[in-house]
Amino acid sequence: VIETLTNRHVSFPLCISSIYHRHCWSIRDHTQTQSINKKQREIEKMFIESFKVESPNVKYTENEIHSVYDYETTEVVHENRNGSYQWIVKPKTVKYDFKTDTRVPKLGVMLVGWGGNNGSTLTAGVIANKEGISWATKDKVQQANYFGSLTQASSIRVGSYNGEEMYAPFKSLLPMVNPDDVVFGGWDISDMNLADAMARARVLDIDLQKQLRPYMEHMVPLPGIYNPDFIAANQGSRANSVIKGTKKEQVDHIIKDM
């Protein structure tokens, strides 16, 4: 071992130190993983996927949820009391009646600048999740997920059970559209398809781009409105798919697209 290390022109004590630290990190990683797994099991015990509210202020019907909420607040007034003006703070209750349709609708999203970095990356991310795509990075095989999404990856406290705090997914608060079901479209001043736009953006790993290409190469934005006063000068060379005419004619064209 010493000969091998010496032939590599590496200090032996340094290598021993390196080996030691790698071993220590291995132990730490293992301990950390165990701790994370334990925490995950604890979270699962305190996590409920769905729930219903039983309250005199909440009523469920076949297609709706009716709820009443009392919002407690205070208002400040400047009034004449006994010949002098005083600041008076008054508690106030505002009653709100909410009616929520529980039938989840279809949802389409049209983006201005669909072929830009944001539009192409958003579309790619949703497709990757919908199709359950995994891809190789320099560190590991990554599975598509919605980490960072307010509705899909966050949770809220809903109460306690046997002294333990109970949480539920944000998306279970009310019936919500699954992002996998969202249909994307939009406009752009460039006629580049979304697969090429994704490659141009250079946001996603190459392996992921290759798998997404068949889903995105047929997606082409509708022509957009090009106004040099509102678009960066470096975008001018890309403007090969624009709506001509007066401003009114352009707006009418956009309305017709929708």
Image (cartoon, grey):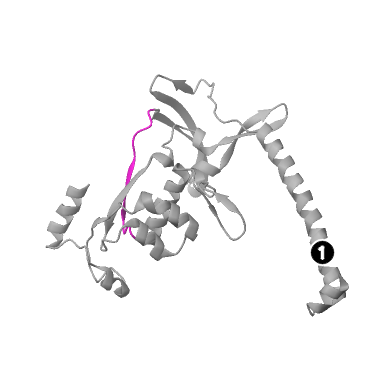
The residues colored magenta run 103-115
Judging depth in this view, the residue of 20 and 87 nearest the camera is: 20
- The residue under label 1 is 21
Q: Position of residue 126 (x, y in %)?
A: 43, 47
Magenta span dominant secondary structure: loop
Judging depth in this view, the residue of 55 and 47 nearest the camera is: 47
Q: Position of residue 100 (x, y in %)?
A: 40, 30
Question: Which residue sits at x=38%, y=31%?
Answer: 104
One can see residue 27 in this view: yes
Relative height, residue 237 to residue 251 (above, below): below
Q: Amino acid at mark 1?
A: His
Is residue 105 inside the magenta stretch? Answer: yes
Quadrant in which the N terminus appears: bottom right
Q: Secondary structure at mark 1?
A: helix
Q: Position of residue 5 (x, y in %)?
A: 82, 74
Question: Which residue sits at x=42%, y=41%?
Answer: 180
Q: Position of residue 169 (x, y in %)?
A: 55, 37
Question: Which residue sits at x=45%, y=21%?
Answer: 59
